[in-house]
Image (cartoon, rainbow, N blue to C red):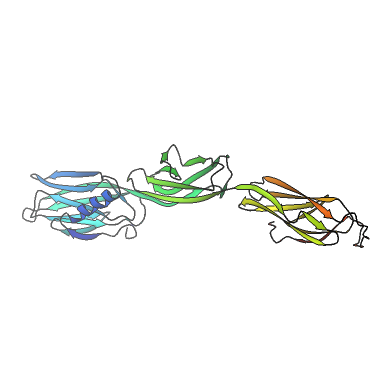
Amino acid sequence: MDDTYKPKQNGGHSNLRRLLLLLFLAGRQPVLSADTEDDNEGLKAVIVGPDYVTVGVPSSIECESNCPACTYSVSLNGQSAQGQGYALAFTVNSWVEALQVTCTVKNDDTALTATAKKQLQVLAGPANVSISGPDLMNPTVSHTYSCHAYCRPSCIYAWKSDNGPWIKGQGNVISITPQEMDSFKILICKATNSVSGLFVTTLRNINVTSGPSQVQIKGPDVIEIAEMSKFVCTAECRPSCRYLSSVDNQTVSGNVVEITVDHPLKSVTLKCEAQNTASRKMSSAFKTVRIKGSDRNLSIRPVGSSAVLLLAFIISAAFIM
């Protein structure tokens, strides 16, 4: 059992006091018990200590007797420390179901002995606490998250959202519905060992999608014939938006378009369509642009077709695929 615990000798009641302090600092009153066995003319052996130990947490078991001059032997699964009034201090390094403690008291003058045995439950965790669920939330939509942890014998889970209260129910699952005004939600899970009361918390900061909103097309209201003009579509989106830009019946990808009118027209209509890359919500904006000097009789420059609008080139640096 060398890979399971590391015992060491320590005198008096100091280790037991240390164990009590550790359990107290963990927020849990330790459950102490004394296992006693009488043998031979009233000689007693008593094991004092908790009913359980936790993996990785220093622990102590003390052997006591009504014979101060006796020799004490305390063993944990057969590994012993001997002396007068000695305790066995140890740390369990890996989980096993239980450990057997044996206390033997011997009167060296009379050769009488007394023995007491105690079985300790071994606890583990919480460890490896994590929250699983979507990386993004959509407003007014319910989202489910689950908390996971390694515990022996089991874990109890509680949840906290933002600055709200701790909520505990059956199981390890919670549903969250963000509001329109939320930009993110802070979700905290607390896993507590059902026996020891030791707990560990973990946190996730989850963004809430928004937009598209404030969709608009920026550019001149009046353009010249035969001159190139630039128009930019903008929108508020979280996490981001993708764009489609239209000039009359011609549509291209991206939020930046440059156009040249080479034929007299009264006006052209621009349309921008923004779509949230996460929620897929869409919103559009329109802009009517007047043509200055459209009454002039300008010849149409050949551009490969007789289209009214020449889409000179498309700039799509802000386009997110």
Question: Picture coordinates of residue 81 (x, y %)?
Answer: 20, 59
Q: Is residue 232 left or right of residue 114?
A: right
Q: Is residue 296 left or right of residue 208?
A: right
Q: Name the quadrant containing residue 310.
A: bottom right
Q: Name the quadrant containing residue 232.
A: bottom right
Task: Please state, as top left, top right, bottom left or bottom right, where the C terminus lies in the image.
Answer: bottom right
Q: How many numbered badges does the structure rendering display? A: 0
Which one is in front, 134 or 123? Answer: 134
Which one is in front, 144 or 237? Answer: 237
Which one is in front, 290 or 313? Answer: 290
Question: Picture coordinates of residue 263 (x, y %)?
Answer: 90, 56
Question: Picture coordinates of residue 219 (x, y %)?
Answer: 73, 56
Q: Residue at x 48, y 51 (%)?
A: 204
Question: Picture coordinates of residue 184 (x, y %)?
Answer: 52, 48
Which one is in front, 205 or 29? Answer: 205
Q: Residue at x 63, y 51 (%)?
A: 236
User: Which residue is outermost to the top?
Assistant: 170
Task: Please state, as top left, top right, bottom left or bottom right, where the N terminus lies in the image.
Answer: bottom left
